[in-house]
Amino acid sequence: MIPPLKGSDDAHKAIVWMEEFRCNFLPVVDNNLLLGFISEEIILEKNDIEKNVKDFDLVGQQCYVHLDTHFYDILKVAAEHKLQMVAVLTEDNAYNGVITVQDTLTSFAQTAAVQLPGGILVLSMNHVDYSLAEISRLVEENHAKILSSIVKEDPLDPGKLRLTLKINQKDLSRIVATLERFNYRVIGRYQENKPVAGEKDRIDMLLRYLDI
């Protein structure tokens, strides 16, 4: 529900809207096309609150997704541009609105991977050793299922991968023992001891799962 500024709006209006909608950035749109995003910091650097927002050095001109974009890609675009919101465009690149990172996480927190009870394992491994099929087989041998997985470069060792798994069991002891027996290194283990109830609890668990 964050409205866009018109290119002809002045900087004073931008600051008032940022305070009203409690956000650090606002999208700037002209003729239904995204021009970029403006922030209070950008305005204060120029020290001219009567200046039209389209005349500032806007950021995030490429910070947009389309209507059918997946959760992961929205978070990726936001992270690349270091913004807490992403513009949403139609197929013909007409401005359609914005989605915030908080909105994305809230929606993501409703998915089965977060809602269903279970535990989380984090593994570190060499690229050559990564095989989700093999890891799934080992997990399923312990009568469990992988609900979701996320793989990324290990920030502590760029030459390795970090694999985060959500598993539909709370007691992960036997699974960890099996993985370690096959030389997989388990570096994180989070067991869910109680149901995830409120929105904040769901988002906290999601952030832990995403390792954000």
Image (cartoon, rainbow, N blue to C red):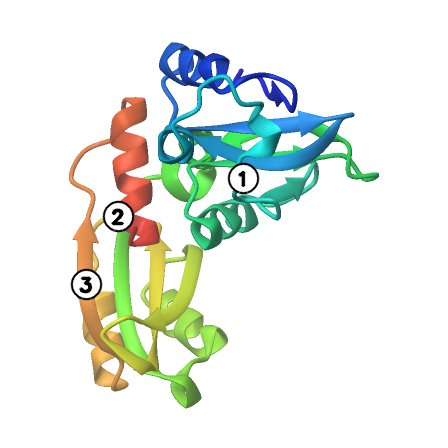
Q: Examine the rendered structure and indicate whether residue 97 appears above or below residue 71.
A: above
Viewer-nearest residue: 175 or 42: 42
Asked if marks 1 and 3 touch (Cβ < 8 Å), the reply is no
Please say if the residues under marks 3 and 2 sit with CB atoms less than 8 Å apart.
Answer: no
Q: CA distance from mark 3 to mark 2?
A: 11 Å
Q: Which residue is mark 3?
A: 188
* Mark closer to the chain start, 1 or 2: 1
**Judging from the image, what secondary structure is the residue with disc 2 in?**
helix
The residue identified by callout 2 is: 208
Q: Nearer the viewer, mark 1 or mark 2?
A: 1
Which of the 4 image quadrants contains residue 124? bottom left
User: What residue sits right under mark 1 in the picture?
Assistant: 58
Distance from Cα at disc 1 to Cα at disc 2: 33 Å
Task: Tell me the quarter of the picture where residue 186 sits.
Answer: bottom left
Which residue is painted at 54% across and 44% down in the image? 60
- Badges 1 and 2: C-beta atoms under 8 Å apart? no
SS class of the residue under badge 1? loop
Instruction: Return the x and y of residue 25 as percentages of the image width and height.
Output: 44, 30
- 185 vs 14: above or below: below
Q: CA distance from mark 1 to mark 3?
A: 41 Å
x 49%, y 32%: residue = 38
Among the 4 quarters of the image, the one containing residue 42: top left
Label 1 crowd (10 A; few <14 / some 14-19 / many >=20):
some
**Other-residue count near label 3 (Cα within 10 Å), few / some / many at <14 / 14–19 / ≥20:** few
Q: Is residue 170 left or right of residue 14?
A: left
The numbered mark, 1 or 3, whose residue comes first in the sequence reads: 1
Residue sitting farthest toward the right:
92
Q: Amino acid at mark 2?
A: Arg
